[in-house]
Image: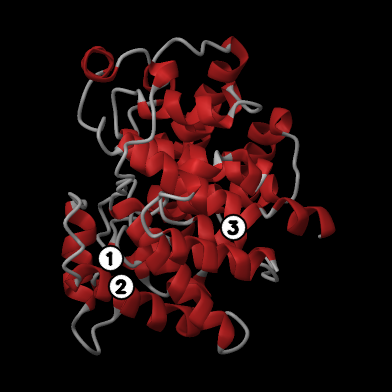
Amino acid sequence: MTALVKKRAATGALIGLALGDAMGFPTEFNDVPSILAMFGPWRELDLPKRAIVSDDTQMTLALGKGLRTAMDRGVLAPKRLERPVREEFVNWYQSPENNRAPGRTCLVACNLLKTEGRPWQEAGQIDSKGCGANMRVAPIGLAPGLSDEQRAGAAQLQSALTHGHPTALAASDLTAHAVRLLAQGAEPTGLVGLLRSYAYDNRTRYHHTWLGDLWARSHDPSPEHFIARGWDECLGVLERLQEAVREGSVETDPCLATGEGWIAEEAMATGLLCFLLLVDEPVTALRRAACTSGDSDSIACLTGAFAGAYLGADAWPREWADRIEYRGDLLTLGALWDA
């Protein structure tokens, strides 16, 4: 615990997430040749002068604030988490600052969450496994004092409020678990193996207490069948990730190995790939993640969260961290959990 606090893992992860988001925001929707033509060599990519973030950081903060409120009220439980997170998501949806090209799934779901008394399961889009749920889940991995069951249940519940597909649930759970392992000092060389073991162990575990009857809104014959679909897709991409790390090709677009990141399991894997290829060079890892042919801001924000959780707040240039948008909110949340 002393080492965890000393390196300020929560602050490092949240600032890293926002920095990656701000670097990837201008390059998103472009292929690599276009990015290179616009910005020059990828190893020289700089943080924009106005370090503006996307909805990825905005929703991370919304989840973080909702989680903080829930934990301030007592032991973390489904209803205690669902209400404040739902309120924060709706506040984000209605905010004039929600003008950063957010995903359609989040917009549709948050509009439905506005209705008082509507079960949240009716809002979550059961067929969507877009990356919008796991690019924001880092706070679940950073919050101290949670049991494994609480962390997994909370990660999947926050996903299900908007993205109800089993792969979105599993990828969010895996992403939070990876952030937690790295914050605790797990060796990156063994990380993929730890994540694969976690996926196998949880493959048919449906968190009834946290998810209720969400599974019944799909066409699956049982809750176990429902959730196994998600874990199986995550296991498939983890296998591709392991092979890509073994090959170690930094100069090749990471999306070619683990996917473009528009969907949950690929965003997680490609963000991890950029981090694992450049563990000791976090800024270079962000640059690689931002210069990708897919969902560059989500990939880079996940890369930043992984790198920051592992290396701590000092991983990032002070001059960059000082001008990131929402700096005060990020530092407040990070300091709370680092303390």
Q: Are marks 2 and 3 in contact (CB under 8 Å)?
A: no
* Residue 28 percent across, percent down from the top left: 25, 33
Q: Pointer 2: what residue? A: 121
What's under tag 1, amino acid-wise?
Answer: Gly
Residue 86, quarter of the rendered image? bottom left
Q: Is residue 310 left or right of residue 164?
A: right
Q: Nearer the viewer, mark 1 or mark 3?
A: 3
- Residue that extends furthest to the right in the rendered view of this protein: 2
Q: Secondary structure at mark 3?
A: helix
* Residue 97 percent across, percent down from the top left: 20, 63
In percent of the image, x 30 and y 48: which residue is there?
52
Crowding at dot 2, Cα within 10 Å, few <14 / some 14-19 / many 20+, comes out as many
In percent of the image, x 56 and y 30: which residue is there?
275
Q: Secondary structure at mark 1?
A: loop
Mark 1–mark 3 distance (CA, rounded to whole Å): 22 Å
Q: Nearer the viewer, residue 72 or 155?
A: 72
What's under tag 2, amino acid-wise?
Answer: Gln
* Residue 40 percent across, percent down from the top left: 31, 14
Q: Pointer 1: what residue? A: 124
Q: Is residue 290 left or right of residue 116?
A: right
Mark 2–mark 3 distance (CA, rounded to whole Å): 23 Å
Quarter that holds the C terminus: bottom right
What's under tag 3, amino acid-wise?
Answer: Gly
Q: Are marks 2 and 1 in contact (CB under 8 Å)?
A: yes
In percent of the image, x 42 and y 48: which residue is there?
18
Mark 2–mark 1 distance (CA, rounded to whole Å): 5 Å
Crowding at dot 1, Cα within 10 Å, few <14 / some 14-19 / many 20+, comes out as many
Q: Pointer 3: what residue? A: 141
